[in-house]
Amino acid sequence: MTPTRLEITRPDDWHLHLRDGETLASVIGHTAQRFARAIVMPNLKPPVTTVAQAEEYRRRILASLPAGMRFQPLMTLYLTESTPAEEIIRARDSDSVFAVKYYPAGATTNSQSGVRELSRVYHVLEAMEKHELPLLLHGEVTDPDIDIFDRERVFIDRHLMPLQARFPGLRMVLEHITTRDAVEFVRGAPANVGATITAHHLLLNRNALFEGGIRPHNYCAPILKRETHRAALLQAATSGDPHFFLGTDSAPHPREAKEADCGCAGLYTAHAALELYAEAFDQVGSLDRLEAFASFHGPDFYRLPRNQDRIALERTPWIVPDEYPLAGSTCKPMRAGESVAWSVVGG
Ligand code: NCD
Ligand code: ZN
């Protein structure tokens, strides 16, 4: 008998885009309903590059929480080629910044201020290794001569392996992994290397980009890959291996920014995040592994306490709205107008 109800320790989201201002206010409730904490991405315009900016952003997030909701934002800094090593000391001494994010310049939304040449930030990485501050990697090369579907694999060979050899003690998370190559690299790495996996990369392969026509709402970075890669990700997520943990990469964009001549990358999944992961784990009969992936491996990697309270899910399908309000516009969520098999009880 497959279970119809599941109760687990409240999970955390280890990779999330909350944006700012009215957009932040539109989306924060979805995450706070499900997750106790989230690692908040710093790719605002302008990016969050200092501890002082991260603390201000943290206050804005807390101020936008709907009344009565509890949620702890875990802040990150955006690494640039001019980040001073002293900022790492300030981050270590703060109780609000938990990691530093590496974006290759040009890889994704608001990555223009990212790093062009890794060797220019070696002094910062040295400080991070010393002070044990995790580096979160958007693991894609951006060279125009590399096929878009190979960007992650080539990043691992060209940059990640040399980085690991140069900074063996550096704590690193390969974010939103999408390939079997990444799974194999992370699985074979020591415990100071981890990886987040999104719900959409567990549920969709690249055919979802072209179902009867081009589907801009399924376009994200890193781009969806072929089925063999999706299967490898699902195997990794449900394997019980502590290297792998939950990170939604929920990335809201106004509908018109995605349905455009040059549409933005990012799927919005916060409205059904835990439910979608439950669906993916259920597909392979591994619901009993969801709690460790969603609620234990992340805090263990970040050396934070596991949450104490619990959340219940039941196998009751519901239909996702066609859209959600997003500041003055709307956002089309994953599964818009279609059903999700699991519900959060009381959610
Ligand atoms: C993210 C965004 O919109 O900020 N987009 C995405 O496709 N995942 C940025 C990112 O994490 O790459
Ligand atoms: Zn992201």
Image (cartoon, rainbow, N blue to C red):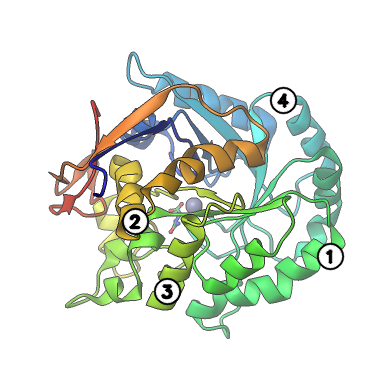
**Sequence order check, earlier mark of 3 and 1:** 1
Residue 165 numbered tag: 1
Determine whether the residue tagged by mark 4 lies in a helix, strand or loop. loop
Residues at circles 3 and 2 in contact by the CB criterion of under 8 Å: no
Disc 1 and disc 4: Cα gap in Å? 29 Å
| Pointer 2 residue | 285
Q: Is 180 displayed left or right of 269 in the figure?
A: right
From what the image shows, is residue 217 above or below residue 339? below
Mark 3 touches mark 1? (CB < 8 Å)? no
* Residue 75 in the image, given as x and y percentages of width and height: 59, 34
Question: Marks 4/3: CA distance?
Answer: 38 Å
Please report contact status of discs 4 and 2: CB closer than 8 Å, yes or no: no
Residue 342 sits in quarter: top left
Earlier in the chain: of badge 2 and badge 1, it is: 1
Confirm or deny contact between disc 2 and disc 1 (CB under 8 A): no
- For marks 4 and 2, give the CA distance: 42 Å
Residue lying furthest front: 1
Disc nearest the viewer among 3 and 2: 2
**Residue located beneath label 4 in the image:** 94
In the image: residue 28, left or right of residue 43? left
Q: Is disc 2 placed on a helix, strand or loop?
A: loop
Q: Amino acid at mark 3?
A: Lys
Q: Circle 3 is placed at which residue position?
A: 225
- Foreground residue among 89 and 72: 72
Q: Nearer the viewer, residue 123 or 343?
A: 343
Q: Earlier in the sequence, mark 4 or mark 3?
A: 4
Nearest to N terminus: mark 4 or mark 2: 4
